[in-house]
């Protein structure tokens, strides 16, 4: 019986693996199709001055409207895009679309675009795509912020730093996204030319219950101030969280309290250049 059980387990496991693989292949084909047929879109979420609510930038967040499955969150399709190399094409499209959209906003408002570590594997291509997006849109490079995560900084440090420096020379800014969620090191903040540190949402979540979260936010704010960088705290959902992070020295915030990601057409009219 033990033998049969073992065999059944193997059979079940093999089937599970085969199912997962075919699901992934299907998603990959659908995603390719979606990219081709314009079923991907960008939603925008405000990043605000934590004291005044004034919008400083909008973060572009990719959405996939699947014909049968409905809205698929980026946590499901970005990893597939990264593994299959499709991210290069998707990333180039997002850069271009975000810059074109931002061109119509007040000049005081920047646009933040997420860039995967895998896009840095072909750094010359990434640099080319950023330049293209700026050229086509005519957007001032200083209004483009590229959000990268700590995972990028662990691998291939020299090549990554070179690419970041090249884009910095053009005038593009960099933000360290989700700080504190991975193998964080305060050294990263100092070693790379970041304009901004975005403190991961988990710290805001534990603010009231956990004094460690408070201390970390406070220390990162102090370090950022010394290094001339801005701090954004992600995931601010309540008025109390807002008050606390302001007291800890945070300048900017992002979260549902200020606005959820929305399609471009639903953004507040006040950001329009014509209204500004
Ligand atoms: P991220 O860059 O850290 O983006 C912030 C995420 O937090 C967004 O999730 C946003 O909807 C969510 N969020 C914002 N405020 C709150 C809040 O107050 N509470 C809670 N619970 N969540 C909040 P989203 O849109 O699902 O995106 C998830 C991740 O997918 C992003 O995290 C980013 O890493 C990745 N992503 C999204 N768009 C792109 C893209 O165009 N390119 C790449 N490479 N990655 C992308
Ligand atoms: Mg981001
Ligand atoms: Mg983030
Ligand atoms: Mg994230």
Image (cartoon, helix red, strand yellow):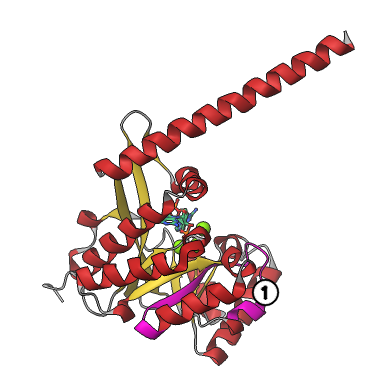
Q: Where is residue 258 in the image (x, y as percent from the top left)?
A: 37, 63
Which residue of the protein is positioned furthest toward the bottom in this rendering? 226
Q: Is residue 196 visible?
A: no
Query: Compared to 205, does 76 lie above or below?
Result: above
Q: Quadrant of residue 55?
A: bottom left
Q: Quadrant of residue 17?
A: top right
Quadrant the C terminus occupies:
bottom left
Q: Residue at x 36, y 53 (%)?
A: 89
Q: Quick one: 67 or 164, which is closer to the camera?
A: 164
The residue under label 1 is 185
Position of residue 11 in the picture relative to residue 201 (left or right): right
Q: Does the magenta portion include 178?
A: yes
Q: Position of residue 116 (x, y in %)?
A: 48, 60
Position of residue 57 in the picture relative to residue 274 (left or right): right
Q: Give the range drawn in magenta.
A: 169-189
Q: Which residue is drawn at 35% across and 43% down?
A: 64
Q: Quick one: 217 or 9, which is closer to the camera?
A: 9
Q: Which residue is drawn at 27% across and 72% down?
A: 134
């Amino acid at each position: 019986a033990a033998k049969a059980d073992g065999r059944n387990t193997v059979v079940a496991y093999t089937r599970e693996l085969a199912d997962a693989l075919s699901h992934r292949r299907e998603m990959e084909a659908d995603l390719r199709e979606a990219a081709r047929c314009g079923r991907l879109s960008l939603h925008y979420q405000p990043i605000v001055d934590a004291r005044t609510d004034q919008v400083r930038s909008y973060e572009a967040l990719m959405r996939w409207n699947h014909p049968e499955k409905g809205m698929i969150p980026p946590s499901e399709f970005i990893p597939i895009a990264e593994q299959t190399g499709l991210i290069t094409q998707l990333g180039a499209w997002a850069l271009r679309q975000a810059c074109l959209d931002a061109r119509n906003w007040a000049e005081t408002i920047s646009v933040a675009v997420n860039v995967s570590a895998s896009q840095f594997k072909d750094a010359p291509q990434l640099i080319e795509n950023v330049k293209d997006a700026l050229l086509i849109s005519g957007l001032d490079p200083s209004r483009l912020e590229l959000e990268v995560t700590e995972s990028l900084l662990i691998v291939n440090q020299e090549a990554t730093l070179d690419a970041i420096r090249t884009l910095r020379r053009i005038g593009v800014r960099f933000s360290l996204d989700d700080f504190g969620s991975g193998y964080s090191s305060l050294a990263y903040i100092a070693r790379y030319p970041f304009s901004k540190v975005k403190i991961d949402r988990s710290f805001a979540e534990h603010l009231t219950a956990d004094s460690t979260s408070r201390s970390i936010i406070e220390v990162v704010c102090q370090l950022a101030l010394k290094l001339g960088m801005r701090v954004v705290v992600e995931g601010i959902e309540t008025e109390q969280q807002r008050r606390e992070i302001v007291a800890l020295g945070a300048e900017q915030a992002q979260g549902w309290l200020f606005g959820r990601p929305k399609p471009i057409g639903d953004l507040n009219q006040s950001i329009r250049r014509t209204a500004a």
